[in-house]
Image: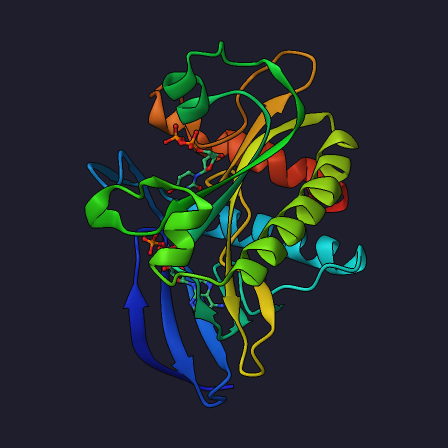
Amino acid sequence: MIKGQLLYEGKAKALYTTSDKDQLWVEYKDQATAGNGERKETIAGKGQLNNQITSTVFEYLLSEGIPSHFVKKLSDTEQVIKKVDMFSLEVVVRNVTAGSFSRRLGVEEGTQLDFPVVEFYLKEDELNDPFINEDHIKVLKLATDSEVSELKEKALEVNGALKKLFDSIGITLIDFKLEFGKDSEGAILLADEISPDTCRLWEKNTNNRLDKDVFRQQTGDIVPVYQEVLNRLTPSHAR
Ligand code: ADP
Ligand code: UDP
């Protein structure tokens, strides 16, 4: 496979075309951002950790019958993915309260929810990714009603599988963000990444944060924290 032109460079990844029009080459960058890019730092090793964690998680999801855009890991920091037409939506699933849910609704962080809550955000950096409802999605033609139902259903399926995975390695899955797109046949496919950048992961016994909140709240170095998540996911590779 040949790496082509830079198609898009985001906060955490760069996407390149390939010799196959339906596939992209992704490079995970050593950049961490908080506050929608307001704070930006280069953190050596972050890219390879997120690439390896995301690759492992997508492989696990496939083994659980949940396909994604992931094709293969090319190197420590690179993957091949299926190119999809992204929905301009972030789909968040919450099992336990934290972050914006707690701030907006005044519910103490760490409260177990009776059922997983699915939320939609408009993926638009300039507007700070606002919270939107299903009517907004429909009226703005971001997705149809049936697509919204499918996105929710798929997000809940991913939640079920991820909860089981993280539980088995001593981690509580608090919440996470997913992105979806449509492939060349119009099928909805899970895309982007699933990593400690996009999930809240709390160590079961201690409630220690094993995710990007360590960077957001400036409570420590994320590299050993993300390494710990990778080690638990791939015990045979633990260094
Ligand atoms: P951001 O754009 O939020 O700064 P990233 O740096 O992670 O985020 O950039 C990755 C970009 O690639 C995102 O805009 C994401 O929506 C997009 N993307 C993820 N998976 C795919 C895919 N399979 N096909 C096309 N675009 C994708
Ligand atoms: N999230 C993300 N990207 C975003 C916004 C949120 O990956 O642009 C993830 C975040 O890491 C957390 C979940 O989505 O796991 C819910 O985030 P929340 O709405 O609480 O926002 P925050 O308070 O983290 O800004």
Residue located 59% across and 48% down the image: 53
Q: Residue 3, percent across and down? A: 41, 81
- Report x, y in % for residue 171: 68, 27
Determine the quadrant in which ligand 1 lies. bottom left
Q: Is residue 239 visible?
A: no
Q: How far across and down, in percent of the image, does residue 183 sit? A: 54, 76
Question: Of 71 and 98, which appears nearest the observer?
Answer: 98
Q: Is residue 22 visible?
A: yes
Residue 97 placement, left or right of 72: left
Q: Is residue 31 left or right of residue 19?
A: left
Residue for point 30% across, 57% down: 10
In the rendered image, the vertical position of residue 168 relative to residue 125, given as above or below: above
In the visual, does 177 lie left or right of 238? left
Q: Considering only vertical position in the picture, is 228 above or below 71?
A: above
Quarter of image, res 28: bottom left
Name the image quarter holding the C terminus.
top right
For the point 66% across and 38% down, which residue is it? Answer: 231
Viewer-side residue, 21 vs 32: 21
